[in-house]
Image (spheres, helix red, strand yellow):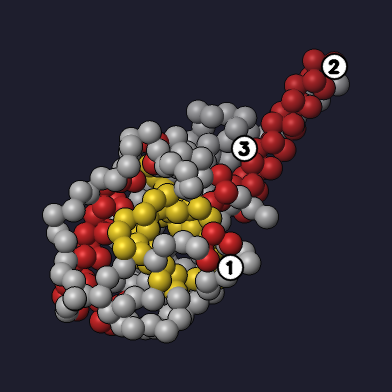
Amino acid sequence: MAATAEVDRPRILYSDDGPEPPYPLRMEGAVISGFGRGSKELGIPTANLPVDTAAAPWIESAKSGVYFGYASLALPSSHPDYQPHHQRSHRSNPRAAVDAPPAPIPSSPSTTTADTTTTKEASEAVAAGEAEQERETRRRWQIYPMVMSIGYNPFYKNAVRSAEVHVLHAFGADFYGAPMRLLILGFVRDERDYASLDALVTDINVDCDVARQSLARPAWTPREGTATAGSSGSGSGSTSSGTLDGAWLVREE
């Protein structure tokens, strides 16, 4: 029997204490083109990842349905949603303005021991600041909340099992080919064969609400912060952070 949307579902799932075993689960790969229905028919764009049981063995026995968690993306610097990370305060002077240059090395005509020590310390401080800036510039991963479907999508009668990710952010452009990592924190619902396209869209929107509200708790929010720019291309760079270990999402290989 064809299903209808369940709009009265709870919007917050699981305990406030954070994910429970077997979660979190991990999955990663380069974003590939999917069925082309997300934006055109549903108004809900999706980023697809290959279902690779060798890289993610858990997916072979995973229940088909909807999941939620976080996606991290390594967007190219040319993408309108790319957020550079190098505008931070210098470690040698945490009170310095974010755009202030490192402190210059003082020069002195004398060569006393005290002056030599001061010059050496200043030089080390500058080197540390430059190294920190280089590390921050290399940190290209941006974390976003997401909801995803794993399965065959009975409404469309897919013959191949797919992993379709809806990142909860309005992007200014596509990002096919971009590396993506998924930290899956919980299960939302089983997949269903809907009576109509409207019922499918309604239930997906409820799924998005469930993901947003379930993740909006400290133990469900990464310590590394999440991108919270509200509109495509805004590049605000603002973040929210919690106590969840999301180090894998931003780790450089």
Task: Give the mark toward the camera: 3 or 2.
Answer: 3
Mark 2 Cα within 10 Å, few/some/many (few <14, many 20+)? few
Does 69 sit above or below residue 150?
A: above
Residue 53 visible within the image: yes
Q: Secondary structure at mark 1?
A: loop
Q: How far is disc 2 from disc 1 in space, using C-alphas?
A: 66 Å
**Residue 102: image tag:** 3
Mark 3 Cα within 10 Å, few/some/many (few <14, many 20+)? some
| x then y, percent, for residue 228 | 35, 51
Residue type at mark 2? Thr
Residue drawn where x is 80% and y is 15% of the image: 114
| x then y, percent, for residue 78 | 50, 69
Mark toward the start of the polypeptide (2 vs 1): 1
Mark 1 Cα within 10 Å, few/some/many (few <14, many 20+)? few
Q: Nearer the viewer, residue 155 or 115?
A: 155
> Which quarter of the picture shows residue 192?
bottom left
Q: Nearer the viewer, residue 112 or 82?
A: 82
Q: Which residue is denoted by mark 1 in the rendering?
A: 53
Q: Which residue is denoted by mark 2 in the rendering?
A: 112
Residue type at mark 3? Pro
Mark toward the start of the polypeptide (1 vs 3): 1
Residue drawn where x is 65% and y is 48% of the image: 134
Q: Secondary structure at mark 2?
A: loop
Residue type at mark 1? Thr
Q: How far is disc 1 from disc 3 in space, using C-alphas?
A: 48 Å
**Residue 76: image tag:** none
